Amino acid sequence: MAISFTAGQDVEPADLNALVTYYVNKGADETVTSSTSLQDDNHFAGIPIPANTTWLAEIWLELAGGEVGDFQCAWAVTGTATIVARHCLGMPTGETNSSDGNVGIQVRDPGSAVSNMVDASSTTRTSTAEMLKLSGGASGGTLTFRWSQDTSSGTGTTIKANSSWFQMRRVA
C-alpha cells in the first residue's frame, strides 16, 4: 500500500499502520501424535486483523513425520474478519515425493473447513504453503492456523521450527 506525505505533515499512527507487515517465525517444533482433531497452532494463533483493512497473507510450513499420519490444516477467524480467498500448494495425500510432479495447487472455499493435506516422510521433510486474502470487516477479528494429522498415527507429525513462518501485508 502506497502512502505519501507532504513537508510539515504530522504522521499519525493510522498512517504508520497502513505500512505494516506482520511476521511470525515458528520458534519451536510442534508435534501432533495420534490425533485427527484440528488444534490451534502454538505460534500462528490470535493474529490480529484490524477493522476496515485488507491483507495478503502466506504461510510456509516444513513438515516431518511418518507417512501414515500425513497432515491437514484449516483456518479459524473471529469477529467480522473473513478469509476472502484461499490457495493451497502441497503434495496430495497418498504421494510420497514431489520428484514426479505430484504437487498440487488448489483453490479452496474460504468459508469451509476443507483441509489441505500433504505427506510427511520420516526421512525427509515436506513443504506446504498457503496464500490468503483477508478482510477485517467492520470491527476486525483474529486469524488462527489449525492443524492435525490427517490419519491418526503413533508416529508424530511435526511442523519444524525456524523453517516455518507466517507473514501478511496490508494492501488496503
Image (cartoon, rainbow, N blue to C red):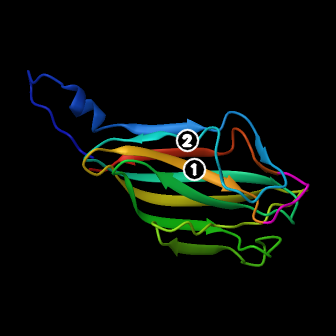
Q: CA gap, disc 2 to disc 1?
A: 6 Å
Q: Is residue 154 on the magenta stretch?
A: yes
| 2 and 1 marks in contact (CB < 8 Å) | yes
- Residue drawn at 51 percent across, 72 percent down: 108
Mark 2 crowd level (few <14, some 14–19, many ≥20, 10 Å Cα): some
Task: Give the residue at mark 2.
Answer: 45
Quadrant of res 148: bottom right
- Asked whether 84 or 35 is in front, the reply is 35
Identify the element where label 2 is drawn: loop
| Position in image of residue 168 (x %, y %) | 44, 46
- Asked whether 20 or 155 is in front, the reply is 155
| Position in image of residue 126 (x %, y %) | 76, 59
Quadrant of res 19: top left
Q: Which badge, 2 or 1, comes first in the chain's sequence?
A: 2
- Asked whether 165 or 93 is in front, the reply is 93
Q: Amino acid at mark 1?
A: Phe
Quadrant of res 27: top right
Q: Count the labels in the image.
A: 2
Residue 145's disc is 1
